[in-house]
Image: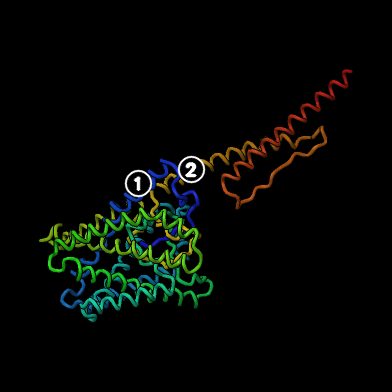
């Protein structure tokens, strides 16, 4: 569920400057808030409750310990072996095998994530008093710890992020210290720190905020508290998305500590909206969707939500994985939420179109260059521009067009020289 704009193409994350770009931006936000977010929440609700119904239902603490063990083990396995998984599973090798194994990977990893959170959450319920002051203190300490480690971005989730199932980064799990797998000892410690420390602090902040909402928003009325959270959550979500341009403008001009502080405050505001959306959707589903048949209700939300996300090519949104550093993106991009779905589709289509143009120009350039390198009767050598692999597509197209123009000029001069020689011979 976490995400970052680091690594996205500049054309995708640039602020909308036309009516078409603004419309696509709005569609992405609507898609994230109205389709992806409820689907992810329903998947988590179904998986969480089904585990509670079948895993030691009469002894929740043992069930929580098993869930925690399964979750931590799953996280560590997928973190430590991500490079081997990426190496062995690629669509260019066996596409059908890749599609099947990648979705199984998402399903298993999603199950591990839910169980990891469930284990920590339930153990806290049994050992932390349900008192506002105690809950607030634990949440505050966990949040401040994340601030000092520049890890506040990791509390973000859908509807403020969409993780697409693109093959390029499908199995990528960033760690806190970004160590290389070539140093196994440090790499395993980095993975363990990312999962056990950062991950646990994130659960503390989420659970504390959720419980404080339980204690503050209509605590004696289940229906009002659920509807209240839903309204508050989507209200804050709308406000936060509306403030993105202003915050981007501010962070473009802020430097150092103040830039990170502004980004963290803005991210925490979005987090309050996120928790309330999750709490509202989750509790309303408990109240109104097949309330008399909990097994069927949870099984349907678990399976149907995951199937829908897989068909929409964003099933990775159910996974909580990786560690992102606050304000690691340049300038104001640190407050831009990674909500890209329709825009990524259009960006891919533009890239394909530009690649076809480059291929056509390269083919034409090859033909022209071959003609220009025939015995040169003018004694001049054609100019050939070197191609740079790191040059962007637009610049490469300009260079190719310039190269074609140079070749045509050389051919024209050659023809003029031939005419002059023939005319001299006749004279």
Q: Picture quarter containing residue 150?
A: bottom left
Q: As rendered, which of 344 and 149 lies closer to the eye?
A: 149
Relative to 416, 266 lies left or right:
left
Q: Crowdedness of circle 2 by 10 Å Cα count: few (<14), some, many (20+)?
A: few
Q: Residue 142 location, x and y as percent?
A: 35, 76
Q: Where 425 sits versus 184, above or below?
A: above
Tell me, yes or no, if residue 133 can be seen here: yes
Figure quadrant of the C terminus: top right
User: How far from the left and from the top, in percent, is residue 420?
Assistant: 83, 24
Quadrant of the image containing the N terminus: bottom left
Q: CA distance from mark 2 to mark 1?
A: 18 Å
- Describe the element under mark 2 as helix, strand or loop: helix
Between residue 134 and residue 310, name the one nearer to us.
134
Mark drawn on residue 350: 2
Q: Which residue is mark 1?
A: 27
Secondary element at tag 1:
helix
Q: Residue at x 63, y 41 (%)?
A: 400
Tell me: 382 left or right of 275.
right
Q: Residue at x 34, y 51 (%)?
A: 29
Depth check, mark 2 against mark 1: the one in front is: 1
């Amino acid at each position: 569920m976490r995400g970052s704009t680091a690594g996205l193409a500049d054309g995708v994350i640039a602020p909308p400057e036309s009516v078409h770009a603004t419309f696509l931006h709005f569609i992405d936000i609507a898609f994230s808030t109205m389709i992806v977010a409820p689907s992810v929440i329903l998947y988590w609700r179904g998986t969480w409750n089904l585990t509670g119904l079948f895993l030691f239902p009469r002894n929740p603490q043992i069930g929580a310990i098993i869930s925690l063990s399964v979750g931590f083990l799953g996280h560590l396995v997928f973190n430590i072996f991500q490079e081997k998984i990426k190496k062995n599973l690629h669509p260019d090798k066996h596409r059908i095998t890749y599609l099947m194994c990648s979705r199984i990977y998402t399903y298993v990893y999603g199950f591990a994530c839910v169980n990891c959170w469930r284990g920590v959450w339930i153990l806290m319920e049994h050992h932390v008093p349900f008192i506002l002051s105690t809950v607030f203190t634990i949440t505050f300490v966990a949040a401040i710890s994340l601030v000092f480690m520049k890890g506040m971005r990791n509390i973000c989730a859908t509807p403020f992020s969409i993780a697409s199932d693109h093959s390029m980064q499908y199995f990528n799990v960033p760690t806190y210290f970004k160590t290389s797998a070539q140093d196994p000892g440090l790499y395993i410690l980095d993975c363990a720190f990312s999962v056990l420390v950062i991950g646990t602090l994130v659960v503390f902040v989420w659970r504390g905020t959720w419980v404080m909402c339980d204690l503050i928003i209509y605590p004696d009325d289940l229906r009002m508290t659920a509807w209240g959270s839903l309204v508050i959550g989507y209200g804050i979500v709308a406000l936060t998305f509306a403030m993105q341009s202003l915050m981007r403008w501010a962070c473009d001009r802020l430097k150092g500590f103040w830039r990170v502080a502004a980004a963290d405050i803005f991210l925490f505001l979005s987090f309050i909206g996120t928790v309330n959306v999750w709490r509202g959707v989750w509790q309303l589903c408990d109240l109104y969707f097949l309330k008399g048949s909990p097994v069927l209700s949870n099984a349907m939300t678990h399976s149907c939500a995951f199937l829908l996300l897989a068909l929409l090519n964003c099933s990775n949104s159910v996974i909580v994985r990786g560690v992102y550093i606050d304000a690691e993106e340049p300038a104001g991009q640190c407050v831009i939420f990674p909500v890209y779905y329709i825009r990524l589709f259009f960006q891919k289509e533009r890239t394909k179109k530009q690649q076809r143009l480059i291929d056509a120009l390269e083919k034409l350039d090859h033909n022209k260059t071959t003609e220009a390198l025939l015995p040169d009767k003018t004694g001049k050598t054609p100019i050939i521009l070197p191609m740079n692999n790191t040059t962007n597509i637009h610049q490469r197209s300009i260079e190719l067009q310039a190269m074609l123009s140079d070749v045509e000029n050389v051919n024209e001069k050659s023809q003029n020289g031939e005419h002059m020689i023939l005319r001299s011979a006749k004279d």
